[in-house]
Image: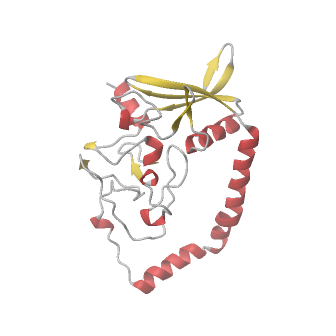
Amino acid sequence: MVECSCCGSCVLEVKRPLSIAHTIQSHENLTYLVKEGSNITLQRNHNYYIQIQGQMAICNKQWCDFFVFTKHGHHLERILFQKDYWEKIVSNLENFFLKYVVVELLTQDIKKKVAHTETSSGMKSISNSIPLLAISTCKPTKPTQAKGKKLNKGRKKVEPKPIYLCGSCQQTCLEIDELDNNCESDYSIGCDKCRKWFHWGCIGFDGMLNMDKWYCDDCEASKENSL
């Protein structure tokens, strides 16, 4: 939250993309920024925009300062609350909850189908052969090390498991075989400190890791502040 003597209070959303830490941010290296005329803005159909609208609605605020920064520059944009837009999002969330979540909680049909499929096919887990840092494993375990090369796109046995939400957009981190388009931006990676999971696209991650451990923006910032 931000307090201003002339503008009042508002929501503050800060992004520090590690993938471009050594260059200036722009619409050319961040997928969620777009150039409109001479201005650079947050894409209105991106998950970050939905996230910000939700934050303003929950906090009952009318505007949000969206701040993206690296060591070489920053982008600051004031985003206003759109009541009509947010009401449509809420309606979609309610429909999804009633149509899918409630039905599964009451019937557990999906859980039963998965268990039946595994039993009838004699599937065996191959999770031990998949690097824990591999894309969208979404398991609450410590990611393994990977240095300077693309992460293996491993597949693992589908089994009933907890749901892990992206620490940025709050959408579910899915397994590879659960993705409709197998888009790399929907893959996910886990933070070695706070154990939160994040979509690649939400944090600007490209699959390259040149360090033993990976930390999310918040944990990286707290680590630097403690030095």
Q: Can residue 197 be seen in this view?
A: no
Q: Can residue 94 be seen in this view?
A: yes
Residue furthest front in the image: 37
Identify the image quadrant of residue 120: bottom left
Quarter in which the N terminus is drawn: top right
Does 16 appear above or below 196?
above
Residue 113: horizontal and vertical position, in percent? 54, 78
Colouring style: secondary structure
Work out whether residue 109 or residue 178 is closer to the camera in this orientation and state it.
178
Residue 126: horizontal and vertical position, in percent? 32, 70
Residue 20: horizontal and vertical position, in percent? 37, 34
Identify the image quadrant of residue 26: top left
Q: Which residue is drawn at 67% across and 13% down?
A: 5
Work out whether residue 114 or residue 188 is closer to the camera in this orientation and state it.
188
Left/right placement of residue 61 relative to residue 40 reads right
Does 10 appear above or below 167?
above
Quarter in which the C terminus is drawn: top left
Q: Which residue is drawn at 57% across and 44% down?
A: 46
Does 155 appear above or below 211?
below
Q: Residue at x 49, y 45 (%)?
A: 167
Does 100 appear above or below 22?
below
Identify the image quadrant of residue 217: top left
Residue furthest bottom in the image: 120
Q: Residue at x 36, y 55 (%)?
A: 141
Residue 139: horizontal and vertical position, in percent? 40, 58
